[in-house]
């Protein structure tokens, strides 16, 4: 009997009604076939909790996650608002950083447009600010 096999009659930690088929590679939790998460089909399975932790650790090591790129993009979109200089500066810096990081992270290649779109929005924000400021100046004169 191999070490990863749960004892006879053991049930899954998440599904008490299901018989455990494996012991989690990381934490030793009993898991049923529904709960099995594998890196490769031939790899030993992990429980869903350990799998989530694993997928969270990997982008962390890369320094960039999908949510960071999306945050940069949202900041960029918000920086269209005129006279939000702090927001605009923050969005520009964040999207410039994201642009270089997305280039280095193959999993994020599909999000490559986000920092660019974010920067475009910030540029538009600067343009609107300038326009409003110029028009405002004309009205005052
Ligand atoms: Zn586990
Ligand atoms: Zn289960």
Image (cartoon, grey):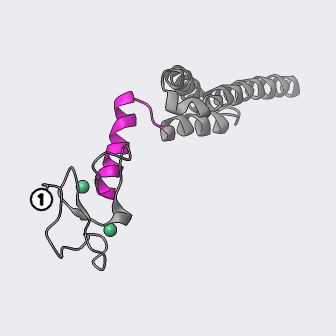
Q: Residue at x 49, y 37 (%)?
A: 68
Is 139 drawn above or below residue 10 in the view shown? Answer: above
Q: Quadrant of the C terminus?
A: top right
Magenta segment: 47-65
33 vs 100, left or right, is left
Q: Main secondary structure of the magenta part?
A: helix
107 vs 43, left or right, is right
Q: Label 1 belongs to which residue?
A: 1
Q: Position of residue 129 (x, y in %)?
A: 74, 27
Q: Quadrant of the N terminus?
A: bottom left
Q: Is residue 2 magenta?
A: no
Q: Residue at x 50, y 38 (%)?
A: 66
The 10 Å Cα crowd at callout 1, few under 14, some 14 to 19, many 20 or more, is few
- Residue 78 versus residue 26: which sits nearer the camera? 26
Ligand 1 shows up in the quarter that is bottom left
Q: Residue at x 74, y 27 (%)?
A: 124
Q: Position of residue 125 (x, y in %)?
A: 71, 29
């Amino acid at each position: 009997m191999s070490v990863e096999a749960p004892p006879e009659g053991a049930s899954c930690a998440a599904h008490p009604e299901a018989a455990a088929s494996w012991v989690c590679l990381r934490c030793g939790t009993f898991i049923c076939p529904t709960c099995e998460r594998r890196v490769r089909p031939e790899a030993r399975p992990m429980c869903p909790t350990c799998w989530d932790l694993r997928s969270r650790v990997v982008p962390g090591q890369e320094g960039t996650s999908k949510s960071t790129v999306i945050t940069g993009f949202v900041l960029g979109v918000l920086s269209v608002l005129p006279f939000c200089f702090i927001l605009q500066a923050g969005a520009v810096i964040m999207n410039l950083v994201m642009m270089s990081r997305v280039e280095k992270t193959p999993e994020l290649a599909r999000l490559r447009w986000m920092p660019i779109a974010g920067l475009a929005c910030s540029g538009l924000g600067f343009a609107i600010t300038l326009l409003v400021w110029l028009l405002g100046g004309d009205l005052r004169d």
